[in-house]
Amino acid sequence: METRILKIDEDTKLDRLDKILAEKLDFSRKRIKDLLDEGNVLVNQKVMKASYKVCVGDEIAVSIPELDSTEVLPEPIDLDIVYEDHDIIVINKPKGMVVHPAPGHYSGTLVNALLYHCKDLSGINGVMRPGIVHRIDKDTSGLLVVAKNDVAHESLSQQLQDKTCHREYVAIVHNPFTHEHGTIHAPIGRDEKDRQKMAVTANNSKDAITHFTVLENFKKFAYIKCQLETGRTHQIRVHMQYIEHPIAGDPKYGPRKTIQANGQLLHACSLEFVHPTTKEKMRFEIGLEPTFKRVLNELREGKNNA
């Protein structure tokens, strides 16, 4: 990993940290954002937000991970295509499939399958994430929309930013509720003790809002629906852990003694957005993933509650 040291002197035009980095480093705005989000930029040995106003005398240390040059290859993997046209493709992602290549997962991903199926994907997110507007975790199943060109990608990304793209999830969580509805409004950032996890924290975090409705209560679990108002990494998983209702089966944020489901019981059940070209309001819904359906039926039958 390369580290670059930038010293701010009186000749430097003072500005926001992200703008200073854009000026000093020959990187895309996306890569600079990733460096900041991942805690790879220190100002005077402290992590700062992108909006930090740089001062004369500041020393900025930028740790630059090596870019992986592994070629992403098309692979003939079956896709559950819910909808497709010239601009977008809506996929029902199975549990266990990684969305895009990353260290340890260079094949068998949704992107590998899309490259084989589509031939034409938006290039805004680079060669490792072509067409990917938003993502869901490996063991989260359900709906996501992929852009087949840059115009569609920009439109969908703007809808996510403007909170006009609506995403709903269902989950099975530990512990029944005493109320039917709730909103969790708590900022999420990188866990300072474990960089592989996210956490509710006031340090170097972003605003995060999750609304939930209780669909069914069981003896030791609950079946809920969640609607995202923001889209932070692991948002529902972190927020449900924060209110002491961690998602069942979650190996990262849940208890050790939990339902065996090969990962968190979280399913993206509906997706709503405006079509980038036709401007038509589109809504998609998908049924439960098989493992999720099995566990839910067992809970209804009184199993898994001991």
Image (cartoon, grey):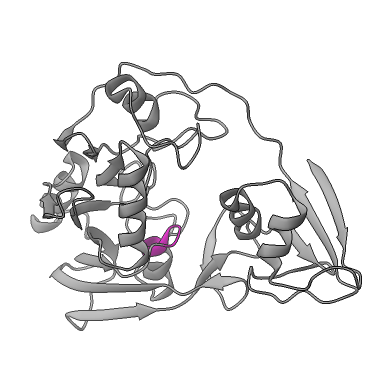
At 59% across and 64% down in the image, what residue appears? 191
Q: Is residue 264 visible?
A: yes
Q: Is residue 249 visible?
A: no
At 44% across and 78% down in the image, what residue appears? 186
In percent of width and height, residue 145 lies at 26, 45
Task: Give the residues drawn in magenta, as a range.
Answer: 232-237
In percent of width and height, residue 292 lies at 20, 47
When asked about the image quadrant of residue 222, the answer is bottom left
The C terminus sits in image quarter: bottom left
Report the residue that reaches farthest toward the left: 301
Total numbered labels placed on residues in the image: 0
Q: Is residue 210 above or below residue 35?
A: below
In percent of width and height, residue 58 lies at 86, 71
Q: Is residue 4 above or below residue 6?
A: above
In percent of width and height, residue 94 lies at 26, 36
Residue 271 falls left or right of residue 154: left
The N terminus sits in image quarter: top right
Report the residue that reaches farthest toward the bottom: 179
Query: Does the segment drawn in magenta span residue 7?
Result: no
Q: Is residue 144 above or below residue 199?
A: above
At 42% across and 35% down in the image, what residue appears? 130
Residue 112 falls left or right of residue 220: right
Q: Is residue 166 above or below residue 66?
A: below
- Residue closest to the eye, 104 or 247: 104
Report the residue that reaches farthest toward the top: 76
